């Protein structure tokens, strides 16, 4: 744990995502859900990357996490933050992951709530013009 802590405190890292993932996985394997949660929060302070949000929400939905409701709160926090930052593509990735989560763990009501947030494809019709 001390080695991981020393490593993540470095300002420059070659592959920080691998290190953080290793540290979080270590805490989960040790059954330390609270430590893993704190690491996710620290990582989100450094980078609000959509993959981190998805991983965090999925973690909360596991037996070591706090459950489905907490996972939904993390998904919702992520959605709000990505919306504030105007990151449309990242929001779609998040919503897709959230929908998969709800289909596996939720009910039809929870799935429809997520699907309502998904962007809609708009078909545009062109007017036909005659050559006359």
Image (tube, grey):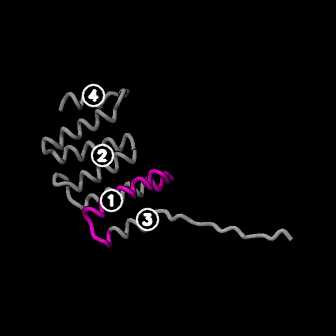
Work out whether mark 2 precedes mark 1 in sequence or the reverse, and give the earlier one: 2
Query: On the picture, is 66 further left or further right than 81?
Result: left
Give coordinates of residue 36: x percent, y percent.
22, 44
The circle on residue 117 is 3
Front residue of 34/131: it is 131
Q: Residue 91 carries which label?
A: none
- Magenta span: helix, strand or loop, mainly? helix
The quadrant in which the N terminus is found is top left
Q: Which of marks 4 and 2 is nearer the N terminus?
A: 4
Question: What residue is disc 4 on?
Answer: 7
Q: Where does the magenta region start and end? A: 82-110
The residue wearing badge 1 is 100
User: Relative to the observer, which residue lies in front, 12 or 121?
Assistant: 121
Q: Does the magenta run of residues contain 87? A: yes
- Gap between marks 4 and 3 measured at Cα: 38 Å
Q: How crowded is mark 2: few (under 14 residues within 10 Å), some or many (20 or more)?
A: some
Residue furthest to the right:
132
Disc nearer the start of the sequence (3/2): 2
Residue 131 falls in which quadrant of the image? bottom right
Q: Is residue 38 magenta?
A: no
3D distance between C-alphas at marks 3 and 2: 25 Å
Residue 15: horizontal and vertical position, in percent? 35, 30
Mark 4 or 3, closer to the camera: 3
Measured in 3D between alpha carbons, the distance from the residue under mark 3 to the one under mark 1, in whole angstroms, is: 14 Å
- Secondary element type, mark 4: helix
Residue at mark 4 to residue at mark 2: CA–CA distance: 17 Å
Give the Cα separation between the discs numbered 2 and 1: 23 Å
> How far apart are labels 4 and 1 at the CA level?
34 Å
Picture residue at 21% right of the left edge, 59% below the top: 67
Q: Nearer the viewer, residue 23 or 127?
A: 127
């Amino acid at each position: 744990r001390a080695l991981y802590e020393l490593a993540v405190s470095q300002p420059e890292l070659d592959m920080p995502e691998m290190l953080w993932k290793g540290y979080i996985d270590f805490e989960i394997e040790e059954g330390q859900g609270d430590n893993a949660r704190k690491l996710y929060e620290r990582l989100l302070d450094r980078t609000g990357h959509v993959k981190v949000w998805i991983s965090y929400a999925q973690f909360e939905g596991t037996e070591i996490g706090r459950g489905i409701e907490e996972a939904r709160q993390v998904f919702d926090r992520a959605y709000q933050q990505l919306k504030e930052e105007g990151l449309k593509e990242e929001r779609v990735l998040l919503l897709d992951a959230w929908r998969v989560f709800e289909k596996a763990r939720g009910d039809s009501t929870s799935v429809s709530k997520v699907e309502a947030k998904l962007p809609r494809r708009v078909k545009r019709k062109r007017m036909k013009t005659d050559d006359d």
